[in-house]
Image (cartoon, grey):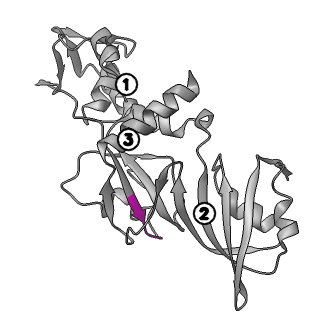
Amino acid sequence: MTSPETARNGERIARRMARAGLCSRREAERWIMEGRVTVDNVILTSPAVVVTPDQAVIVDGTPLTEPPPTRLWRYHKPRGLVTTNRDPQNRPTVFDALPKDLPRLMTVGRLDINTEGLLLLTNDGGLARTLERPSNGFMRRYRVRAFGSITQKALDSLKDGGNIDGFMFGSVEARLDRAQGSNLWLTVNLAEGKNREVKRLMESLGLRVNRLIRASYGPYQLGRLASGEIAIVPARALRDVLKATSNSCA
């Protein structure tokens, strides 16, 4: 998220293009190297350029518009969707399923194809990186259904973190909630959210995860969002969280 002071002092051209919703930063850098971007009638040859609001930025012959206000959405991701813009295997993506009247969005972190639940989406790459920053200490809470048997004592062994076949993990809080037939329901809280981390940890304890739902990400909750539903986070709630993260990183 770009502050008024940052906007006045200028920002990298690729970031400016991404905030305007035109493309990703990586795409912007490629477009610049292809000679498709000019600033004050000068064709750029490098993305290492800082632009200010009073400079004229032209992309493919069209003036770059002012970036829209930063926004954040909560989305209840269904199973079966990948969280990429384009999938080489042509599997359906989150972006294929979103309402068509939304602006260009990017995800805050990812959920794998078989994980459902809360996925945060934003129109501002800077905000996405801020919310993903490990120093924020945002906890991710998951509801886990798994096949097998386990004791609370065994789950407590995850609290100190460790190494499982070269996979390093930090402190994890896991609680056994109830047994349902041959399945167990657990609540798992972790701060990092590495790729397949919950499934790997459960497998190390002899459990096989057959349903994984992210219930919260930091202060943001899945709540009563139905599968496939999306809702905007109120601007004030977003400002309060950003203020708190800014203070914690100061």
> Rounded to the nearest whole Å, what is the CA distance between mark 2 and mark 3?
22 Å
For residue 4, say whether it is visible. Answer: yes
> Is 195 positioned to the left or the right of 132 in the image?
right
- Look at the image and tell me in which quarter the C terminus lies: top right
* Left or right: 19 in relation to 182: left
Q: CA distance from mark 2 to mark 1?
A: 36 Å
Q: Residue at x 43, y 64 (%)?
A: 77
Q: Give the mark, 2 or 1, whose residue is nearer the N terminus.
A: 1
Label 2 close to label 1 by CB (< 8 Å): no
Q: Which residues lie in the magenta part?
A: 75-79
In the depicted view, which residue is nearer to us: 70 or 77? 70
Residue receiving disc 3:
238
Residue most toward the left?
A: 62
Element on which disc 2 rests: strand
What kind of element bears circle 1? helix
Q: In the image, which is nearer the foreground, mark 3 or mark 1?
A: 3
Q: Which mark is residue 142?
A: 2
Kind of residue indicated by mark 2: Tyr
Q: Relative to residue 124, is residue 34 depicted above or below?
A: above
**Residue 81 percent across, percent down from the top left:** 44, 65
- State yes or no: residue 141 in magenta: no
Q: Secondary structure at mark 3?
A: helix
- Residue type at mark 3? Leu
| Residue 93 in the image, given as x and y percentages of width and height | 39, 60
**Quarter of the image containing the N terminus?**
top left
Report the side of 194 relative to 56 (left or right).
right
How many C-alpha atoms fall within 10 Å of the one at disc 3: few (<14), some, or many (≥20)? some
Kind of residue indicated by mark 1: Glu
Residue that label 1 marks: 29
- Give 87 or 63, whichever is nearer the viewer: 63
